[in-house]
Amino acid sequence: MILEIINKKRIGKELSYKEIDYFFNGYLNGVITDYQMSSLLMAICINGMTDEEIFALTKVFIDSGDVLDFSDIPGIKVDKHSTGGIGDKTTLVIAPIVASLGVPVIKMSGRGLGYTGGTIDKLESIKGFKVDLSDEEILDQVRKINLVVTGQTADLVPLDKVIYALRDVTGTVSSIPLIASSVMSKKIASGADKILIDIKVGNGALLQKREEAKKLSEIMIKIGEVYHKEVRTIISDMNAPLGRCIGNSLEVLEAIDVLKGREKDNNFVDLCYKLATEMVSMGKEITKKEAYYLVLESINSGEAYKKFLEMVGMQGGDIAKIKVSEKTYKIKSSSNGIITKINALEMGKISLALGAGKLNKDDKLDYSVGIVLNKLIGDTVKKGEVLATFYTNKKIPEIKIENIYKIN
């Protein structure tokens, strides 16, 4: 039966729910081997899946573990997920904003494997910050401050954890059916009432083409309908790094600057306001215009930053002890002009080489290293001006400025 299922998908035929359940749970239980699962994943990556197959796979993922119930928490719980990108630290900003406006935020985030850390890695750069909370601790904290950001519980969609680990090393991460099933199973199992998905497109993202992002958006909305969940999506650009900072501690410090209102008018701030507006609109069931003004007021009044500090305090963190490397290296412009491009993928590769990300699961992150972009797209630069500063504890990799910056 194992070979029959692989061959069926290899030639592009539709798998039944029974076949999908047998194969994927067989892998979770050790009956299906890595090489057999890899074969099926590659067949899915090449031939895709029908909507019915995607619905079936999502259900199999959800049913593999616990489904959390936060119905006794007052208010509409809105969750957010990003498909990831270089310098994406939006959760650190939007979760406190939304929670400060009376919408409960119970955010279960993951670690990174690749160019930079995940949300949990970034939070762990705050000394003492506890990311592994029990269900009881999560409920208690949400009741007290309306906000918690924690790692995924061990029993939440365990099938996705083992499948994602295999996808990551078999070149099947960017499959739209597999992305949709993975993301939506976790969001639904996490107990959200409504879900916002930020789909990144560009050379620093999983998806390279806008058409692919639209397909992913459509199927995620359909999965939401199956489970009676409102799902909204935003397609955002990832051809340039998001914001000024890449690297765990540096990204936390940048998020703090945004929450304090110190950082304005760049692609990161704009996206944070857009995502927060959508979440507040969904959670309070108001127009986006009304929600946007509430988001601005949350920042301007200091309530968003106050909420961030409450979360950090309750989870044992101390922002005064965030550290960045004292060793820096600067690259400078070799010409006068206007910056028209900053290559997100190349910046991601450099941040990985510095130690801000992981190539393998067992690699150790250096929270203190990363990159600060001193100049952003649209900025005018003069010859000799600093374009970027690299924070490092090791030898700087060879950097070809022309591969990163385009100055006209």
Image: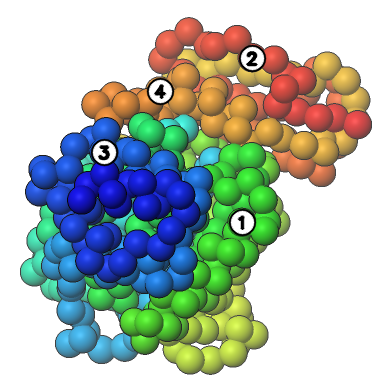
* Residue type pointed to by label 3: Gln
Nearer to me, 86 or 328 = 86
Which circle's residue, 1 or 4, is located before the other in the chain? 1
* Residue type pointed to by label 4: Gly
Q: Position of residue 314 (x, y in %)?
A: 20, 60
Q: CA distance from mark 3 to mark 4?
A: 33 Å
Residue at 16% x, 62% y is 64
* Residue type pointed to by label 1: Glu
* Residue type pointed to by label 2: Ile
Q: CA distance from mark 3 to mark 1?
A: 27 Å
**Front: mark 1 or 4:** 1
Residue 184 lies left or right of residue 33; in this view the side is right
Which circle's residue, 1 or 2, is located before the other in the chain? 1
> Where is 265 relative to 217, above or below?
above
Q: Write down the residue under mark 3.
A: 36
Q: Write down the residue under mark 1.
A: 212
Which circle's residue, 3 or 1, is located before the other in the chain? 3
Few, some or many C-alpha atoms within 10 Å of disc 3 (few <14, some 14-19, many ≥20)?
A: some
Q: Write down the residue under mark 2.
A: 399
Can the viewer see residue 146?
A: yes
Helix, strand or loop for disc 4: loop
Helix, strand or loop for disc 1: helix
> Where is 287 relative to 350, above or below?
below
**Is the C-beta separation of discs 2 and 4 under 8 Å?**
no
**Front: mark 3 or 1:** 3
Helix, strand or loop for disc 3: helix
Nearer to me, 25 or 146 = 25
Q: Write down the residue under mark 4.
A: 355
Q: Position of residue 263 (x, y in %)?
A: 61, 53
**Is the C-beta separation of discs 3 and 1 under 8 Å?**
no
Few, some or many C-alpha atoms within 10 Å of disc 1 (few <14, some 14-19, many ≥20)?
A: some
Which circle's residue, 2 or 4, is located before the other in the chain? 4
